[in-house]
Amino acid sequence: MRKSKPKKRILLPDPKFNDQMVTRFVNMLMYQGKKNTSYAIFYDALSKVEEKLKESGLDTWKKAMANVMPTVEVKAAGLVVQHSRFRQKFVRIAELPLSIKWLIGYARGRNEKTMADKLANEIIAASKNEGAAIKKERRYSQNGGSK
């Protein structure tokens, strides 16, 4: 067992919007260490969102992220004889990776031509409480956190 907890790594904010949440999103979007490519995809997707909705792309993305974030999680109560599950409100840190993973995963599964188009359309759908990522969040919350 470790003697002490590992130090928390500080994420630098992204260069355009100066936001750490954008950096976390881009890091999970990235393949094979190609961070500049994933930044280009993300910024291109936000510009396409702005063109289609005539709203700020970053605000629409944040609204979509808030809609996709799950509200409950299930923790196992470790009893000796039986294991029971109970619902619990999500800790703020734990809900963000799930929402990022769902938004990116369902964007990759869409049928548009480029990843920027896929991501832009999934962001638009999630901001309107539609789309596959929202379905996943609703299913997750109804089943009490079981995937």
Image: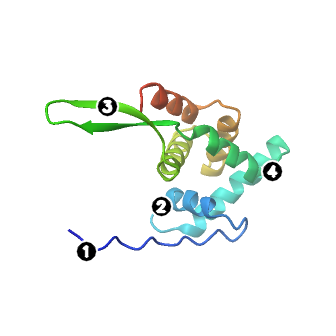
Q: Which residue is mark 3?
A: 85
Between 116 and 18, the one nearer to me in the picture = 18
Mark 2 secondary-structure assignment? loop
The image shows residue 125, relative to residue 41, as above or below, that is above
In the depicted view, which residue is nearer to us: 51 or 11? 11
Dot 3 amino acid type: Arg
Badge 1: residue crowd in 10 Å (few <14, some 14–19, many ≥20): few
Q: Nearer the viewer, mark 2 or mark 1?
A: 1
Task: Give the Cα distance between marks 1 and 4.
Answer: 47 Å
> Are the residues tagged 1 and 3 within 8 Å (C-beta)?
no
Identify the residue shown where x is 47% and y is 68%. Answer: 33
Q: Marks 2 and 3, how far apart in space?
A: 36 Å
Residue at the image point whose x is 63% and y is 63% from the top: 39
Residue position for label 4: 56
Mark 4–mark 3 distance (CA, rounded to whole Å):
41 Å
Lateral position of residue 106 relative to residue 53, left or right: left
Q: What residue is rendered at 66% in x and 31% in y?
A: 129
